[in-house]
């Protein structure tokens, strides 16, 4: 089996920055177990597989895998896959709106076209799943509790990718954060699905952020579109950014790990009542072919003299 794939960097215009993504434009005949093994082999934050036979007039079927887990929804894979789909003509290049069918359901994509287009996804419904004490979260991140943003709770929100949101006092504190995975795992031990932690500081432009996701097989994620919609909701809810219709801000992520990323946010309606869009640029990096051959039998793999010793 030969599978062509494309590597793009998402939420950047500069190759080798942003968040890398591998996109397989035709994964016909590839089962889920093999998709997971391919994602583990490539070891990027996510790898996506387009399934033409499961696509229809309503949208293109896409499955998303981290090295360790299949995702219900993810942001940079949605943006990057949509970019590749337009480049390859899977959707018409002049298309300004189209749908990706992900495990979470239909995800709408909009394109601001031009020489360097911005692609936007509409965040799925956001829900609050829980809340954790500020003391526990500070201990888990290895920072003093008084470095957390004053009077802001630590909430677990999800739009398909559950994450604990921790607001701190400055970008310098964000950069000092280190997740103690043992404490984190105890903190979320009652949860049946992988959970992440998103640490951020409000800035003049919007937010300076880092995302840790060891339960998904990702120690740190350079850019996380799936939590940027919930980030906007969280910041509006707690008065850290305007709640008004038309609010726009930018989350800077990945800088500490040398993969600077800019995630743009558009808020439609008060408190995002008419939708929260997350968007960014995409840079093309590489096209490659993966050749998967069946494993040889023991008799084929070993010389006859060795087989004699084993008999």
Image (cartoon, rainbow, N blue to C red):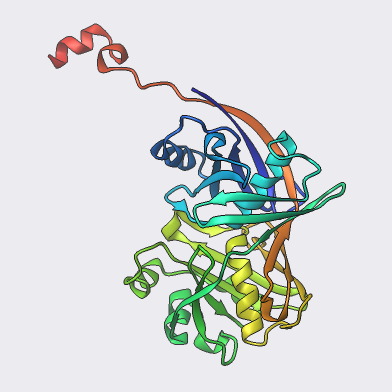
Q: Indicate the position of residue 257 as horizontal and vertical percent values.
A: 62, 58
Q: Quadrant of residue 87?
A: top right
Q: Residue furthest top?
A: 304
Front-most of residues 275 and 170: 275
Please name the residue shown 33% across and 18% down the image: 296
Q: Residue furthest front?
A: 57
Q: Is residue 305 left or right of residue 111?
A: left
Please name the residue shown 62% across and 46% down the image: 59
Q: Quadrant of residue 25?
A: top right
- Can you see residue 86? yes
Q: Indicate the position of residue 212 as horizontal and vertical percent values.
A: 51, 64
Please name the residue shown 44% across and 65% down the image: 195
Q: Residue furthest right?
A: 115
Front-most of residues 161 and 97: 97
Q: Is residue 150 above or below residue 168?
A: below
Front-most of residues 56 and 81: 56
Q: Indicate the position of residue 239 as horizontal and vertical percent values.
A: 67, 87
Q: Is residue 74 above or below residue 50?
A: below
Q: Indicate the position of residue 33 as horizontal and vertical percent values.
A: 39, 39
**Where the C terminus falls, by quadrant?**
top left
Counting labels gives: 0
Q: Is residue 304 above or below residue 234?
A: above
Q: Residue furthest bottom?
A: 151
Q: Is residue 171 above or below residue 38?
A: below
- Can you see residue 169? no
């Amino acid at each position: 089996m030969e599978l062509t794939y494309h590597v793009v960097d998402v939420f950047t215009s500069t190759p080798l920055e942003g968040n890398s993504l591998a996109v397989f434009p035709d994964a016909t005949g590839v089962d889920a177990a093999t998709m997971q093994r391919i994602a583990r082999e490539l070891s990027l934050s996510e790898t996506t597989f387009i399934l033409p036979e499961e696509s229809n007039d309503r949208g293109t079927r896409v499955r998303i895998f981290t090295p360790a887990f299949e995702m219900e929804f993810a942001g940079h894979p949605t943006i990057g896959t949509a970019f590749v789909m337009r480049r390859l003509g899977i959707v018409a290049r002049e298309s300004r709106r189209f749908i990706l069918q992900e495990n979470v359901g239909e995800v709408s994509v909009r394109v601001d076209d031009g020489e360097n287009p911005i692609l936007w996804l509409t965040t799925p419904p956001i829900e609050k799943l829980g809340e954790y004490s500020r003391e526990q979260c500070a201990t888990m991140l290895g920072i003093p509790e008084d470095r957390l943003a004053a009077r802001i709770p630590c909430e677990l929100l999800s739009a398909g990718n559950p994450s604990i949101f921790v607001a701190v006092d400055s970008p310098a504190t964000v950069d000092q954060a280190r997740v103690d995975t043992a404490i984190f795992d105890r903190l979320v031990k009652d949860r049946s699905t992988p959970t992440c932690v998103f640490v951020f500081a409000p800035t003049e432009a919007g937010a300076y952020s880092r995302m840790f996701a060891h339960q998904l097989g990702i120690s740190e994620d350079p850019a996380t579109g799936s939590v940027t919609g919930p980030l906007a909701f969280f910041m509006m809810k707690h008065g850290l950014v305007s709640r008004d219709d038309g609010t726009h801000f930018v989350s800077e992520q990945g800088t500490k790990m040398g993969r600077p990323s800019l995630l743009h946010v558009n808020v439609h309606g008060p408190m995002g009542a008419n939708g929260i869009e997350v968007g960014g640029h995409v840079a093309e990096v590489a096209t490659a072919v993966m050749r998967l051959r069946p494993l040889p039998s023991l008799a084929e793999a070993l010389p006859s003299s060795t087989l004699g010793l084993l008999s």
